[in-house]
Image (cartoon, rainbow, N blue to C red):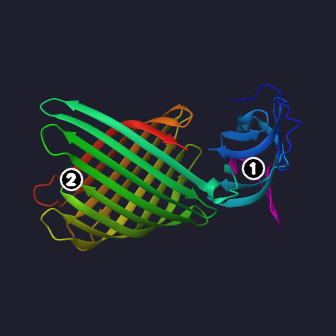
Amino acid sequence: MRVMLIVACFAFSAADAAEIHLKDGSVVIGTILSLKDTEDLIVDTEHMDEVVIEWEAVREIRGTQVIEVELFNGQRLFGRVAVDDKGVSILGEETTVTLPRDRVFTIAEVNESFWDGLSIYTDVGMNIVRGNNEVTQLSFGGGIGYDGVDFETSVDATTIINEQVEGQDLRRATLAGNYTYRLPRNWQVSGLLQFESDDQQGLNLRTLVGGALGNRVYNQRRMRIDLHGGLVVNSEEFDGQPRNESLEGLLGSVFRLRSARGIDVDLSLWVLPSLEQSDRVRLQFDGSLSIDLFADLDFKLTVYDRYDSQPPPGNDTNDTGLTLGLSWSY
């Protein structure tokens, strides 16, 4: 949203306050928190709380605190930032780099403490089916992540409970941890650990441990595409069968879309060909559609599909589910 009124915050006392001069003559004084998707500059002011300014409306910026600047090619720079007609200048301790504005992907406040880098979300959903059988599906999910200077890590958990009037209740649970270390030119090295159980498929427990090398092959304001390749060890146990361990390849893609209207799409597809059974291939697909309702509350639709070309006797090749619910991030 373009700031149309002249904002004067002369009493702002923070030493790291910046002056943001807009093309319409307005001046906003405050601490820069972030530049999201090369579109919205978020500034914390003393008298107006957080102000959202269109990046294209900014004419000049002076006197920022030390902040992090990420370029579209994945390079990260740290320093005080100045913006003028020449472009964006990052003033580091030893060098100054000046770049065109269109090369800047995001700007973020440098976390001053461990707690500043944390992000947490929770999901809850419910579906009710009435027909030959009455089924109530409840879903609960949550996750915590940390974004460091050169790495990011996260832990996510999901539980889906199908309560049936006629029949036994069925549960599906997943717990996944991920660690990613960022390399130059949008390359990254990742380690993963995943636990999964599914009563519907008779899966008591599947454990995946492995690593991958990936690259962000497409990185624009609203869209990202990552490709990954690596290896995982699959340890799984089904009802009535002994535990089996095997080595699998990992080929994956992660897609992210951020709409200007508050609609977000996240998709991931992992292809896991067995390196010990030539005729077995597994696929893991997860997707979510989030619609911003207000503040940090979203309406969320999630879908998953698990494919196994050689499932245990009596199991289908596909296990698919869809849930509707609400998500709250903080």
Residue 91 part of the magenta segment: yes
The furthest residue to the top: 5
Q: Nearer the viewer's eye, disc 2 or disc 1? A: 2
The one of 300 and 159 positioned closer to us in this rendering: 159
Rendering coords of residue 318 (x, y %): 22, 51
Which region of the structure is painted magenta?
Answer: 87-105
**Position of 300 relative to 280 (above/below):** above
Residue that appears at 59% across and 44% down = 221
Looking at the rendered structure, the kind of residue marked 1 is: Pro
Q: Is residue 84 visible?
A: no
Q: Secondary structure at mark 2?
A: loop
Residue that appears at 44% across and 53% down = 254
**Position of 307 relative to 59 (above/below):** below
Residue assigned mark 2: 199
In this rendering, position of residue 14 left or right of residue 261: right
Looking at the rendered structure, the kind of residue marked 2 is: Asp
Q: Quadrant of the C terminus?
A: top right
The one of 292 and 126 positioned closer to us in this rendering: 126
Rendering coords of residue 102 (x, y %): 69, 47
**Position of 29 relative to 106 (above/below):** above
Q: Secondary structure at mark 1?
A: loop
Residue 301 part of the magenta segment: no
Residue assigned mark 1: 100
Rendering coords of residue 191 (x, y %): 45, 67
Rendering coords of residue 20 (x, y %): 81, 40
Q: Residues within 10 Å of mark 1 (few under 14, many from 20)?
A: few
The one of 10 and 315 positioned closer to us in this rendering: 10
**Residue 21 figure quarter:** top right
Which of the two labelled residues, at mark 2 and mark 1, occupies the earlier sequence position? 1
Residue that appears at 29% across and 69% down = 234
Q: Is residue 254 visible?
A: yes
Residue that appears at 30% across and 46% down = 160
